Image (cartoon, rainbow, N blue to C red):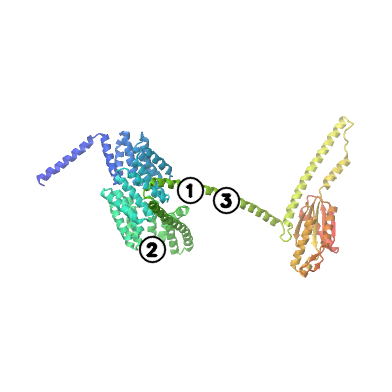
Amino acid sequence: MNSSIKVTLWAFIALGFSVINAYAAMDPKDKFLQALEGIEQITYSLPIKAKAQISELEEDYIILSQPSALVVRYYLAKATVYGLLEEYDRSLEAAQLGLKRTEHTNVETLTLKLREIQALRHQKVDVLPKLDALLIEAGNDHNAQIESEVLLAKSLYYQEQGEFKKSYAAIMTSIDTAKSIDNKELMERISHGLGQILVQLQDFDRSQLLLENSYSYFKQRKMSYSQLVSLLDISKLQESRNQITAAIETYKTALKLAQILGDGRHRFRINIELARLYRDTNNRDQMRFFLKKAEELQYRESQPGYLATFQLLQTQDLLEQKRYGEVIEFVEPLIAHIQQRSNLLIQQIELLKVAAQAYAGQNNYKQAYETYDFYHLRSLTLRNVEQIENLQRQQMLFDLERLQYENQDLNWNNVLQKLEIENHQKTFHLLGEIVFFLALALIGLLVIFIWANRSRIKMGMLAKTDTLTGLYNRRYMEERFAKHQSKSYQNSSEALIKLAQRILMWQQTWFKGQSSPKKNAEPFDSAQLDEQIQHNEDAKPISLILTDIDYFKVINDTYGHAFGDQVLVEIAAIFKSSVRSSDVVARYGGEEFLILLPDTDLSVASEIAETLRRKIEDHDFVTESRESVSVTSSFGVLTATNTDLDLQALCEEVDQLLYAAKASGRNCLKTRWLTY
């Protein structure tokens, strides 16, 4: 080594030591400020490196002794870096800590509020009211840069909600606002966002121009991270235009840049996209190569969409190799989770199809059918939604182009306000429609309730009545008799209580009369007591009339069953028109009818039975051929006062009377007062 090289080497070493000593001798405030400025300079170009430098600052603990203004700037840089890296929880925490240290409203305060809102947006919080409030606050502070940033965030919010027309209007308003300030970087970020929206709206020509211009700007300024994001959007655009080869090359360029940046998360995503594209082009070797690379980086990813794509590619590859057991082992734990969710990604739905094919490969056709049926249902629903959304986006693009053509000097802020007012009006009308349909639903429920109640009553009547004659049936007669018996028991009990009270009163009066005789004392009358007891025992008789049509089998055999049914119906009509409202008439079986007459003694019951017998005898029964047929009936009439008897026992007694009437030549009645 010659002397000149040695001198140069020692000079560099000396310079290095002097720099280290100078940095060590620096005031902690100056050290912190220098480090913070370095972080701010590389936030959008090298956010991963900025994150590492933030960690170093926190390890040195010098942040605790810094002035509030510097601490606020530090938290703002931290919130921005973590937001770019999609670590939204840490971004939100940093923004909120920074806001606690702010003393008055300034640029940092407004930007911290924006970072807080951006982090909350990714936690599925409705941030639109917060964005509107911040936009007003920035306007009052005359801060056009913050206004433009808020409008850009508002555009992203509307884009996520699928409201592309308002998203477009918001980002155009952001551009109009940004034009009033000299901030080329902000303009390019907004233009990049506009390019993303136009890709969604399928305006590929304009989106390509915007995205390529943004990429060129970021590349020229060496903003590597923004450059990487632009490349990914260009790749998606190329894929949308079916430029698959170009998309693959762009993804590979992005992959190299992600490797330089040390961005494992984006490397995972790019490897997934490359594996997917190579699979679509039937290049299995390249697909497996990039899938293997992705497998090594999957721990870096947290977004469900990319993880689901990775899982789908893995299982599809296993399925093609006929490794059905491995597919099922991999997919089964996921299926239970998928079936419980209402909102599914297309990749998760496709996993169900892979599982169904694997079950079929193992000859488990029942499980294959059930899984595929669920897949088909969810897939059909999702694809219908996608088709509707695509049509809506094309209509939105047409509307926006027409709007620009008709308004050369368009004020996009007014357009945005108009669209938002229309949205509020739609919301109001929607609420009105909801109230209207709820009212209709309530009316419908009321109608259904009334119908169901009527049906219930009708079904109840059908269960209690005979379908041919419309009279009550045996079941209802038994229920009605049981109610009558219960009421009789109650009346008997009340009568016995009154009788006991009367006896007690007589006893008291008699004893008092013995001790101090009174002229007007009522004497104890045993005859009257016997009469009361007898009256109680004989009260409330019940009568049964059992009738049977004479020679009904002969009528059926001679004139046919249709005429036999006609005879039954006409006799039923005679009974219904002849008995009292308190009486119960039932078809008891075949050609037999039973009439329950509550509180009716034997003489009245006999008169009613005789009336019915004569009406049947005198009635003109006519066949379809206009032939007159004479029909008669035999009757058994039974009256009882013993409430301990059940209907079956009474029916057996009255049936004997009916049998006696038939034995006596028919068309007559036999009566009996049943006493025990």
For disc 3, the neighbor class at 10 Å (few under 14, some 14 to 19, many from 20) is few
Please indicate whether residue 123 sits to the left or right of residue 521 in the image.
Answer: left
Residue farthest right in this picture: 519
Q: Nearer the viewer, residue 33 or 388?
A: 388
**Residue 493 x %, y %:** 78, 44
Q: Quadrant of residue 534?
A: top right
The residue sitting at 86% across, 63% down in the picture is: 664
Q: Which mark is residue 426?
A: 1
* Residue 520 appears anywhere in the view: yes
Q: Nearer the viewer, residue 164 or 567?
A: 164
**Residue 274 x %, y %:** 33, 57
For disc 2, the neighbor class at 10 Å (few under 14, some 14 to 19, many from 20) is few
Q: Nearer the viewer, residue 97 or 227?
A: 227
Give the mark, 1 or 2, whose residue is nearer the N terminus: 2
Give the mark, 3 or 1, whose residue is nearer the N terminus: 1
Label 3 to label 1: alpha-carbon separation: 20 Å
Please indicate whether residue 655 sits to the left or right of residue 447 in the image.
Answer: right
Give the mark, 3 or 2, whose residue is nearer the N terminus: 2
